Image (cartoon, rainbow, N blue to C red):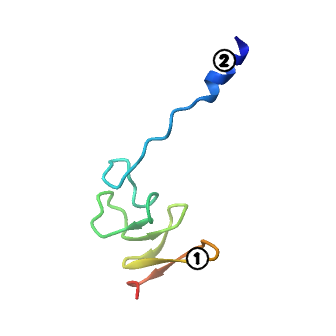
Amino acid sequence: MFLTLIAATLITAPAPTITEDSPAWSCVDDGNRICGPANPEHKPAGCYDDGGVLVAPWPCHIVIDPATGDADAYTGAAK
């Protein structure tokens, strides 16, 4: 009985998939973390970091270093 109880507590439901059309989607926390003007959350338009802090105002773009996976946000449209 003890082993059955432990096994039951280790099984968890999978996390729901959140897509851009979902009401749970957040342009600050999900996807590329870029909120455009007039976004449905009424957040300031721009690029956000992993902590939800605005790091570059709109228009902005993200550049990812393929060697390290690190990303930087820049103001202005991508060239």
Q: Name the residue that disc number 1 marks.
A: 66
Is 63 situated above or below 29? below
Camera-nearest residue between 41 and 29: 29
Please give the label number shown on residue 5.
2
Say which residue appears at 50% left-offset and 38% top-offset: 14
Which residue type carries mark 2?
Leu
Q: Quadrant of residue 50?
A: bottom right
Say which residue appears at 58% left-offset and 76% top-offset: 66
Q: Quadrant of residue 39?
A: bottom left
Q: What is the x, y in percent for residue 53?
A: 51, 65
Camera-nearest residue between 57 and 72: 72
Say which residue appears at 50% left-offset and 61% top-offset: 52
Q: Is residue 3 left or right of residue 45?
A: right
Q: What is the x, y in percent for residue 25?
A: 38, 52
Camera-nearest residue between 51 and 63: 63
Q: Are marks 2 and 1 in contact (CB under 8 Å)?
A: no
Please give the label number shown on residue 27.
none
Is 70 situated above or below 28? below
SS class of the residue under badge 2? helix
Is 9 situated above or below 25? above
Is 50 situated above or below 47? above
Q: What is the x, y in percent for residue 61?
A: 43, 78
Q: What is the x, y in percent for residue 67?
A: 63, 77
Circle 1 Cα neighbour tier, 10 Å, few/some/many (<14 / 14–19 / ≥20): few
Q: Quadrant of the N terminus?
A: top right
Q: CA distance from mark 2 to mark 1?
A: 45 Å
Which residue type carries mark 1?
Pro
Circle 2 Cα neighbour tier, 10 Å, few/some/many (<14 / 14–19 / ≥20): few
Q: Is residue 31 left or right of residue 6?
A: left
Say which residue appears at 41% left-offset and 76% top-offset: 57
Mark 2 or mark 1: whose residue is earlier in sequence: 2
